[in-house]
Amino acid sequence: MENEIVDVLIIGAGPSGAVAAGYLQQHGVNIKVVEKQKFPRVVVGESLIPRVMDHFEEAGLLEALNSYGFEKKPGARFIRGEEHCVFDFSDKFGEGWDWTWQIPRADFDKAMTDELQRKGVDIAFETEVLDVSFDGTDSLTTVRDKAGKLSTISAKFVIDCSGYGRVLPRLLKLEMPSKLDYHSAIFTHIDDVRRPDGVEGTQISFDIIETEVWLWVIPFSNGKTSVGIVAPTEYINKLSASMDNHEAIQEAIKLSDYYVARFSGLPYEFDPIRLTNYSVAVSQFHGAGYALTGNSTEFLDPVFSSGVCFATESGILAAKLAKRQLEGEVIDWDQEYSAYMKFGIDVFTTYVKEWYTGNLQELFYHRPENPDVKQKICAVLAGYVWNKENPFVAKHRNIVKNMAYLIKQ
C-alpha cells in the first residue's frame, strides 16, 4: 500500500482546516489536507463574527477572500416584536475588527481552498479517513479516495478539522454530551426577490418568536438569503411531525410578523436541511500527536454565530503550536491549547445559556440603553471572548444574570 510522509496531516478543508493549512504553508511546513466531501457543498455557519478576520489575515487568505465581494456584516440586529436591538461592531469595548462577512459557505469554503491550492497546498478531496493509529510520536492514517483506492499517510502531527464529521472523536471514542439543552434547526436559502433597498435589505437579523424559538435571516451579496428556524428539539419535532421541512420553514416565516411579507411563498434554492441536537462536546481537546479543532471539539449554538470563530481560533492556534513542537519546543498543550480554548467556549456558553433563560434578552431590550454595557456585550458578540479586561468576559458567569435580576426588580 502506498504511504505518503508529511509533517502535519490536516483532516478537513473547512474554515478551521483552511486557516491551519494557510498558516503552516506560509511557514514552510510539509502538510497535506484530506477532505471527505467534494467542494462546493452546502453547510451551516454562514454568519461570521469579526474575530475571524484576524485568523484569515494570519493565514494569508484575507486578500483573496476580500476580492469575492461577499456581503459585509457591520453588526447584527435582534428583533422581538416591536422591539429592536442593533449591535454595531465599530462601537465595542477594546480593539478588534469592526466588520466581517455574511457568506454562502459553499462559495466561501471553495474560495479558501482554491486560494490554498493556488499557493501549492496539497488538498485531497473526496478522500475519507478510515483509521488513525498513534505511537506516541508519529501517526499512521489510512484513507480511501473517490476511486476506492486505499493508502496511508505518515505524519508527525494530526490536526482534526473535520467539523461534524468528528473523525478523531469517533475513532478515539472522545465524544461527550453537550452541557447545553437539545436544540435543532431547519434552514434553506431563499431567492430574496422582495429584498428592500439599503441597510434593511442586507442586515443580518435574529427574530425572536418565543424566548427559545427564533428565526435567522442572513442576506448574501448574490441575492439569496439564508432563512432558518431554531428551537428546542421537542418544538422542532412537533413542527415537522405534521409537515415536511419545506412546510416547516414556511410555517416559521408565518410566525414572524416582521418577515412574513418578505419571504412567504418564495422558492428555495435547495431542499431545507434539518440539524438535530447540533450541540456537541468531547472529553479532551488534544492527545499525543494530535489536536481537535472547531466542531470536532465543541459546537454551541448558532444564535451568536460563534461556530466558525471557534473553528478558526482553534485551527490557527493548533497550527502554531504544532509548528513550534516540530521545531523541538516542548508545548504545554493543556495550558496553551485546551485551557485557552475552553475559556472562550465557557464565555460563549454562558451567553447562549442566558439567552435561552431570557436573562440576556432582558439586557438587550432594556430601555434606556446603557451604552457602556452594550459596548462590552458587543465585544463578546464580535468574538473577543479572551479579553479579560472586559468585565463581561472576566465575570461572565454572574454578570448577565445579576444585571438581569436588577432590571427585573
Image (cartoon, rainbow, N blue to C red):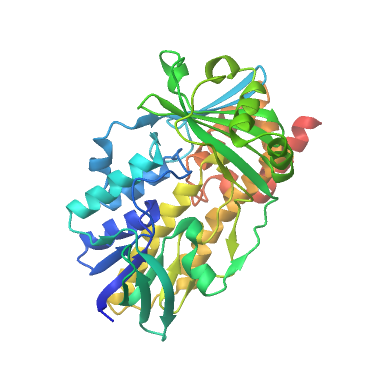
In the drawing, does residue 364 fall left or right of residue 267?
Answer: right
Quadrant including the C terminus: top right
Residue at position x 62%, y 29% from top? Answer: 247
The answer to which image quadrant residue 282 occupies is bottom right
Q: Nearer the viewer, residue 305 or 340?
A: 305
- Residue 395 shows up from this direction: no
Q: Against 156, is 223 above or below?
A: above
Single out the residue that lies furthest toward the right.
409
In the drawing, does residue 399 fall left or right of residue 324?
Answer: right
Quadrant including the N terminus: bottom left
Residue 226 coordinates in the image, percent (x, y):
48, 32
Residue 39 coordinates in the image, percent (x, y):
33, 49
Q: Against 14, is 288 above or below?
A: below
Residue 296 coordinates in the image, percent (x, y):
49, 61
The answer to which image quadrant residue 157 occupies is bottom left
In the drawing, does residue 341 fall left or right of residue 129?
Answer: right
In the drawing, does residue 83 fall left or right of residue 124?
Answer: right
Single out the residue that lies furthest toward the front.
147
Single out the residue that lies furthest toward the bottom.
135
- Residue 286 shows up from this direction: yes
Q: Nearer the viewer, residue 251 or 233?
A: 251
Residue 121 coordinates in the image, percent (x, y):
22, 59
